[in-house]
Image (cartoon, helix red, strand yellow):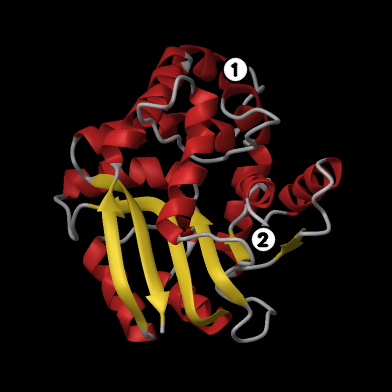
């Protein structure tokens, strides 16, 4: 990852931390991701936690796993995994303040003996070969400038028989029509995401690295209420956002995040992307 792109990702999460804290997650969830709605879910908070459950079932998480939470954010999924399974979790993120918050939460939950966090790039880590039995990536691989590099490092880090589970955004096709590409990047640019790949590109990268049992399941119908919720909040607050930016209380990054939170749903409704659950295995 080049230095400027890395800096933009850190700046995005530094500048939007209050937005996420006030409008999205709670101390219980710490989830910087969308929620999964099924018949058991009755609230936004439950949906955020439920995505962890869905990923764990799909990824085959089991007691004894040694897990890398690649792009761990504030450690929400890492904490959930350690609370619900007898596993050891290592969370990594580019963002220093997220490491600090995640470590504090682990200590408070008395889980710090089984969870650790550090500031690292998931495409170029300092871990030894064959270290982890599972790699977990929840809405984080999207930030990789080159998805191939993510798969290369994941393959190196996984033990034989290890699994990768990823919840993320996937483009419908490449290329889109020019107006489609513009709308897609109206969303991505404000969230410091260089680009997203289509399923066939992911499969080619993964299989070239040696992965097998590649599968992407389209779960948009279960995440759409969460996606729509963000769009609704952002749209209702748009006029206020313009006013606050005008008087200097919101900066360019804050405003870009707000604008993108509207455009992501517009791009979804135009069928430019979908929300998917990706899984694969290293033999």
Residue 282, x across and y down, in percent: 42, 80
Which residue in the structure is indicated by mark 1? 244
- Judging depth in this view, the residue of 245 and 76 nearest the camera is 76
Which residue in the structure is indicated by mark 2? 87
Work out whether mark 1 precedes mark 2 in sequence or the reverse, and give the earlier one.
2
Dot 2: within a 10 Å radius of its alpha carbon, few (fewer than 14), some, or many (20 or more) residues? Answer: some
Dot in front, 1 or 2: 2
Residue 134, x across and y down, in percent: 54, 68
- Judging depth in this view, the residue of 153 and 121 nearest the camera is 153
Residue drawn at the location 28% of the way across and 72% of the way down? 203
Residue 1, x across and y down, in percent: 55, 70
Residue drawn at the location 61% of the way across and 61% of the way down? 63
* Vertical placement of residue 240 versus 95, above or below: above
Quarter of the rendering occupied by the C terminus: bottom left
- Judging depth in this view, the residue of 162 and 94 nearest the camera is 162
Dot 1: within a 10 Å radius of its alpha carbon, few (fewer than 14), some, or many (20 or more) residues? Answer: some
- Rounded to the nearest angstrom, the CA distance separating label 1 from label 2 is 45 Å
Q: Secondary structure at mark 2?
A: loop
Residue drawn at the location 66% of the way across and 36% of the way down? 17
* Vertical placement of residue 180 versus 226, above or below: below
The answer to which image quadrant residue 142 occupies is bottom left
The reply to whether residue 182 is in sight is yes
The answer to which image quadrant residue 105 occupies is top right
Q: Secondary structure at mark 1?
A: helix
Residue 227, x across and y down, in percent: 38, 31
The reply to whether residue 1 is in sight is no
């Amino acid at each position: 990852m080049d230095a400027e792109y890395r800096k933009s990702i850190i700046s995005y999460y530094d500048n939007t931390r209050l937005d996420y804290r006030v409008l999205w997650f709670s101390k219980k969830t710490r989830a910087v991701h969308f929620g999964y709605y099924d018949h058991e879910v009755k609230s936004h908070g439950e949906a955020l936690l439920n995505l962890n459950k869905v990923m764990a079932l799909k990824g085959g998480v089991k007691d004894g796993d040694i897990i890398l939470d690649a792009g761990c954010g504030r450690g929400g999924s890492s904490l959930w995994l350690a609370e619900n399974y007898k596993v050891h979790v290592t969370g990594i993120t580019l963002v220093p303040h997220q490491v600090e918050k995640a470590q504090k939460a682990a200590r408070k939950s008395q889980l710090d003996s089984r969870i650790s966090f550090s500031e690292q790039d998931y495409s170029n880590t300092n871990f030894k070969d064959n270290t982890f039995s599972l790699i977990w990536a929840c809405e984080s691989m999207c930030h990789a400038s080159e998805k191939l590099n993510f798969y290369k490092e994941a393959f190196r880090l996984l033990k034989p028989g290890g699994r990768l589970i990823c919840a993320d955004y996937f483009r419908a096709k490449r290329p889109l029509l020019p107006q489609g590409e513009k709308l897609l990047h109206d969303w991505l640019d404000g969230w410091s995401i260089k680009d997203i790949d289509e399923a066939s590109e992911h499969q080619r990268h993964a299989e070239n690295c040696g992965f097998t049992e590649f599968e992407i399941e389209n779960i948009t119908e279960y995440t759409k209420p969460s996606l729509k919720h963000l769009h609704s909040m952002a749209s209702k607050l748009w006029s206020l956002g313009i006013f606050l930016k005008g008087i200097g209380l919101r900066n360019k990054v804050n405003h870009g995040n707000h604008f993108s939170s509207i455009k992501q749903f517009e791009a979804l409704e135009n069928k430019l992307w979908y929300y998917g659950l990706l899984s694969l295995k290293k033999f």
